[in-house]
């Protein structure tokens, strides 16, 4: 297709899959042009909160890829300057590439997806001891920090109390 330009493990395959997805998007929607819609005060405040939440999660020993990506997306949405927005979006893409590489490096996942173009079907795993719904909503996964007060999770804000 083209010479190997990538040296980071997993990035070449990631870029090729992105290229295929972009081709599908172009075929379906054509070349699109929309306003950025970024840089509002609300988005800037949300970026600050996302940074704090990510830092707190990793400082407390339960940081996840979700925390990292959420922070990067919020930082991108906070930018109104096109050059800075572009740089932030590159960081979002790099986190996505790293997360996908991590998923693909997991032995069970690697065996399931080896030689295929699509990810395996998601199967429900039984809730394990230590991981349970936090009671903030019914839409996100159980997690081990459900009992820790004032710890952020995808289902609530830092100031919201659980609805158990």
Image (cartoon, helix red, strand yellow):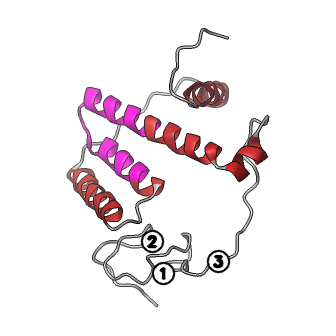
- Residue 97 sits above or below residue 140 on the image: above
Asked whether the residues under the numbered discs 3 and 1 touch, taking CB atoms below 8 Å apart as contact, a structural biologist would say no
Percent x, y of residue 45? 22, 56
- Specify start and end residues of the magenta stretch as a single range: 68-93
Q: Nearer the viewer, mark 3 or mark 2?
A: 3
Q: Residue 127, labelled with which disc?
A: 3
Percent x, y of residue 31? 54, 23
Mark 3 or mark 1: which comes first in sequence? 3
Percent x, y of residue 126? 70, 75
Q: Nearer the viewer, residue 158 or 111?
A: 111
> Magenta region's main secondary structure?
helix
Kind of element beneath mark 1: loop
Kind of element beneath mark 2: loop
Asked whether the residues under the numbered discs 3 and 2 touch, taking CB atoms below 8 Å apart as contact, a structural biologist would say no
Q: Nearer the viewer, residue 61 or 52?
A: 61
Asked whether the residues under the numbered discs 2 and 1 touch, taking CB atoms below 8 Å apart as contact, a structural biologist would say yes
Q: Residue furthest bottom?
A: 164
Q: Nearer the viewer, mark 3 or mark 1?
A: 3
């Amino acid at each position: 297709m083209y010479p190997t330009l990538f040296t980071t493990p997993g990035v070449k395959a990631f870029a090729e899959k992105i290229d295929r997805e972009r081709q599908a998007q172009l075929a379906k929607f054509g070349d699109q042009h929309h306003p950025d819609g970024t840089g509002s005060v609300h988005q800037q405040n949300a970026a600050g909160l996302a940074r704090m939440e990510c830092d707190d999660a990793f400082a407390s020993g339960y940081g996840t890829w979700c925390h990292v990506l959420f922070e990067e997306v919020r930082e991108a949405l906070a930018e109104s300057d096109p050059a800075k927005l572009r740089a932030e979006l590159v960081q979002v893409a790099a986190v996505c590439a790293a997360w996908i590489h991590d998923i693909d490096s997991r032995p069970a996942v690697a065996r399931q997806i080896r030689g295929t173009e699509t990810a395996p079907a998601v199967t429900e795993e039984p809730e394990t001891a230590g991981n349970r719904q936090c009671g903030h909503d019914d839409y996100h996964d159980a997690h081990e920090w459900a009992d820790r007060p004032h710890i952020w999770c995808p289902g609530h804000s830092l100031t919201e109390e659980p609805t158990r």
